[in-house]
Image (cartoon, grey):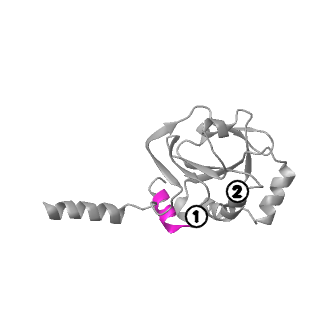
Amino acid sequence: MRFLILFIFLTTNVFANDVSEIKNVVIHKDPKVYDNVIFLDKKDKRINLSEFNGNLILLNFWATWCEPCKEEMPSLDRLQINEDLNNLKVFVINISKESIKKIDGFFKELNIKNLEPYFDAPTTLAKTFGLRGVPTSILIDKEGKEFARIIGSIDFDDENFIGWLKDYN
């Protein structure tokens, strides 16, 4: 019996991609559901998140004045094109109502090539998601439910994080 318990414990820990070392990741026991998650593209076109059901979604809320946002954005840019996560769609949503010119300069300075900037809609997703600061990333599963969030910055190149995310891809 002891052997069986030890075996279950060891295999669970070996096969589960462990993100416990990443202190900022909060995994929800019960995924959260939101209605009408809408944000804007550069041309003020409304983007409804429900159009992307079937994809793994990462919504990253950020601002140009945020140093941790600046630090994590290049790894987030690489995450978007990670071949192991071909069903992942990353939306970087600026919450500060900053000008397109300022945001384009931010992207150029950081050499961001795989992401497009989006903007928080007037209904403020920051309020909808109860954000307490930036950066914050919301992870949405293929059914449109928030299964985890990242409060603060992380290295999106982290192999443990990518392995864990592949389980949802």
Residue 33 locus on image (x, y percent) = 51, 35
Residue 58 showing in the rendered view: no
State yes or no: discs 1 and 2 in contact (Cβ < 8 Å).
no
Name the residue type under label 2. Answer: Leu
**Residue drawn at x 66%, y 40% as measured from the top left:** 126
Residue 106 locus on image (x, y percent) = 80, 59
Give the residue at mark 1: 82
- Mark 1, Cα crowd under 10 Å, few <14 / some 14-19 / many 20+, is some
**Residue drawn at x 73%, y 62% as measured from the top left:** 112
Q: Does the magenta stretch include residue 160?
A: yes
User: Looking at the image, which residue sits at the far left?
Assistant: 1
- Label 2 sits on a secondary structure element that is loop
Give the residue at mark 2: 115
Give the extent of the magenta segment. Answer: 158-165
The quarter of the picture where residue 66 lies is bottom right
Name the residue type under label 1. Answer: Asn
- Label 1 sits on a secondary structure element that is loop
* Cα distance between the residues tagged 1 and 2: 13 Å
Q: Main secondary structure of the magenta part?
A: helix
**Residue drawn at x 79%, y 43% as measured from the top left:** 97
Q: Is residue 75 above or below residue 38?
A: below
Residue 25 locus on image (x, y percent) = 51, 54
Residue 34 locus on image (x, y percent) = 56, 34
